Image (cartoon, helix red, strand yellow):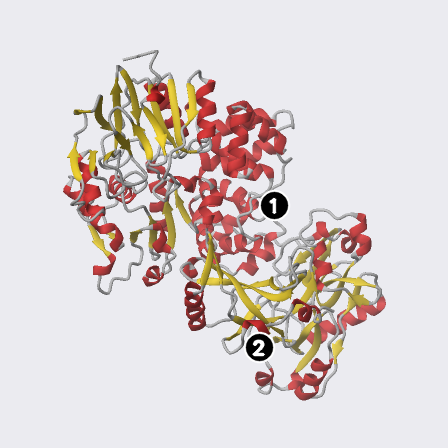
Amino acid sequence: MQAFAQLLDALSFQPARNAKLRLIEAYLRVTPDPDRGWALAALTGGLDFPAAKPALLRSFGEDRIGAELFHLSYDYVGDLAETLALIWEIDPAAGPPPTLGEVVETLQRATRIQTPAILKHWLDALDSTGRWALLKLLTGALRIGVSARLAKQAAANIGDRPVSEIEDVWHGLSAPYRPLFDWLAGQGPRPQSNMGGAYVPAMLANAIDRAELDTLDPAHFRAEWKWDGIRVQVASSGGVKRLYSRAGEDVSNAFPDIIEAIDFDGVLDGELLVRREEAVAPFNDLQQRLNRKSVTPKMLKEHPAHVRLYDALWLEGEDLRGLSFDERRARLEAWMTMHPRQRFDLSPLVRFTDWAHLAGLREEMRQDGIEGLMLKRGDSPYVAGRPKGPWFKWKRDPMLADCVLMYAQRGHGKRSSFYSDFTFGCWRPSAEGRRELAPVGKAYFGFTDEELRWLDKWVRDHTTNRFGPVREVEHKLVLEIAFDGIGRSTRHKSGVAMRFPRINRIRTDKPADEADTVDNLLRFVP
Amino acid sequence: MTSDTLNPRSWLYPTPRGLYCEPGDFYVDPAVAVSRAVITHGHGDHARPGHRAALATPETLAIMRARFQEMPDTAQQPLKYGESVRMGSVDVSLVPAGHILGSAQAVLEHKGQRIVVSGDYKRRPDATCPPFEPGPCDVFITEATFALPVFHHPPDAVEIGKLLRSLDTFPERTHLVGVYALGKCQRVIAMLRAAGYDKRIWLHGGLASLCKLYQEHGVDLGDIALVSDAILETFKGAIVLCPPSAIADRWSRRFFDPIPAMASGWMGVRARARQRGAELPLIISDHADWAELTQTLKDVGAPKVWVTHGREEALVAYARSIGIDAEALHLAGREEEDEA
């Protein structure tokens, strides 16, 4: 448990992806089974036990140091699990700390009534970091910025294998993954991939622009719209039905309407959308349904989910991945014609004669819900990862707005001495009848290293106020912001939220007064 | 030593200039320049320049001279640990506080009543200064920087172990450790040496003079060198110590993919550590944690305790719960500082 706690602790402070990977790898290499397997389960979200209630933690704390001191402590720290972990003291008489395996196996067997006594004993035996990790594990909120895919990548790295191989076998495995580690260490056979609702590693596209297109032969390519939703995989076999994000995270719980509509065996690739009548709803509507453990009936009714299909990887027990795109597409079309379904439809192919023609179609298509075009070679098999050549995405040109820099925050890692996260705003009438800036977004890329150095210096030279790592600056610098979409938002002060904003140009030539207004931005809202 | 009739507040009390001892006509750690000051230790919120006369340990006076351009206009009165001097009708002596080099508790006796102004202190061992000596008194004035039950500074070896383990995991990255120039810097070096780390430790220029002063006072810091003196040094896998503010400064750009670490008692609370941008928070403090504070109240056994700078409320509540007559004492010129 202590080693796992140290891992969680280090991960929680480490923002960089590669560094996180290294930390997990180092842990998986040296930690024995079954602990490392349980750790992998915890990091991939595969551990589930009856969560400890906040009331239990609070009562532990108040019993320990009295209500007044506990209240003062909680008030200062602001996180209940952390407060309890900090005020508790190790009891030398409690014996050695539990291993992660002990914790998980005991909790899986323990009754609700036994849990408090067991928990108390562990708190006595663990150090502060250990207690924090234990309580985070029990309250079901690790919040350390590690995705399931990242954890799998770390496992893949210790066996020197591509992550797609782990994903291929993953869903046939269960914690603590002994056969997986044996295989990775070269001491066991490759685990069987059980296709029961397993995720199949997705194929991804590279970005392309108009100029590069001229180097390609249009006759080799098929075009389809790139819908503005979430790329998903629908996987169903042997009665197990799942919906996965593109990274292999199981999002089935948030979309029972889709799961319910699956009445076939297969693995299909498509775009998850919210669809009302025939129209695709703005991305914002889909966002309402993401990241939820459960969904209300009202939500299901008002934000009905839908999958628009691009590709078939498996159909009725047959692996189609080795076939060409054209063959897979023909199979998918035939299958859809025979079994029309609610909540699933086919993303149509866009017919075109040459690139100029396609460019024209792309220009005309201003319909909401479309991000651009996908181009796929007709002869491309379905391969995991992002191979160069077979698939391209040709996004719609971004929307642009001139915004005024308001705040800058220091970055992390290599950027920790640079002000590299920029919050910018647009003008709107203030309550006093004058004009004020309302923050409309935040961007931390889009600029070159040289521009970053320039921006950093500008921020340092024009600071008006400091709040921890954040500086407020004079409202003088205009940034041209590029973004892929914009919607109304109640969570943002300005009432709008941008999709994928980045800094397109630094407009030192433009006075801040002439930057865009919030009203201008609202005109982009579909 | 007890005098039931004398009210201690009648001869030692807070004023806008600082804590004033009337029968001795001096201030303890005053917030502004005064005619006569008794200084517990060299940190900036306790030792200030410009006093006409200052009494402190020889080490503290040396630190003040190094920080305040030799202080030619201040009459300096060194008082060794355990020696006593009479000021007006008050006997003053200095006793080790275990905080930093030269740090002392000011023990004041007047008409048979003894008040201990402990300054800042800690109870755990520190290779760079003698340990805190608890002594009986009528009134004990304690700091309260970390006076909440959430503050339990882990053992030295645990925190230094974190740093050394990170060096193992990221052997090519520069480990940039933010430390306060006086006390924390030298203690972290001493802790690394005690853990067996014998490679060169690199220093930001702002840390040089106080390290030299510690060495002159017999504190062994091993192989240390200035970053600015290094030619063609990559600093890959090196430990570099710097003032906390330098991590965010352009100065830090010379290092290869640095890991910002921070050595401070505040690092025990995650939100505080994130606020400071620490990716490797090290909970290393020169102040007493909750256990040390509460143990000290028991060790000195004073019937009255005055609690100052920090989270007075919690320590006052605790002291009262064990039958001590405790109250908060609000002093001018104290704030939370990096040196914690």
In percent of the image, x 35 and y 50: which residue is there? B244
| Place of residue A151 in the rendered image (x, y in percent of width and height, measured from the top left) | 53, 52
In the image, is A232 to the left or to the right of B320? right
Q: Secondary structure at mark 2?
A: loop
Q: Is residue B250 above or below residue A206?
A: above
Cα separation, mark 1 vs mark 2, equals 36 Å
| Place of residue A38 in the rendered image (x, y in percent of width and height, measured from the top left) | 54, 42
Q: Is residue A211 above or below residue A475?
A: below
Image quadrant occupied by the N terminus of chain B: top left
Can residue B153 be seen in this snapshot? yes
Can residue A93 be seen in this snapshot? no
Q: Earlier in the sequence, mark 1 or mark 2?
A: 1
| Place of residue B10 in the rendered image (x, y in percent of width and height, measured from the top left) | 34, 21
In the image, is A279 to the left or to the right of B207? right
Q: Amino acid at mark 2?
A: Gly
Q: Which residue is mark 2?
A: A389
In percent of the image, x 31 and y 12: which residue is there? B3
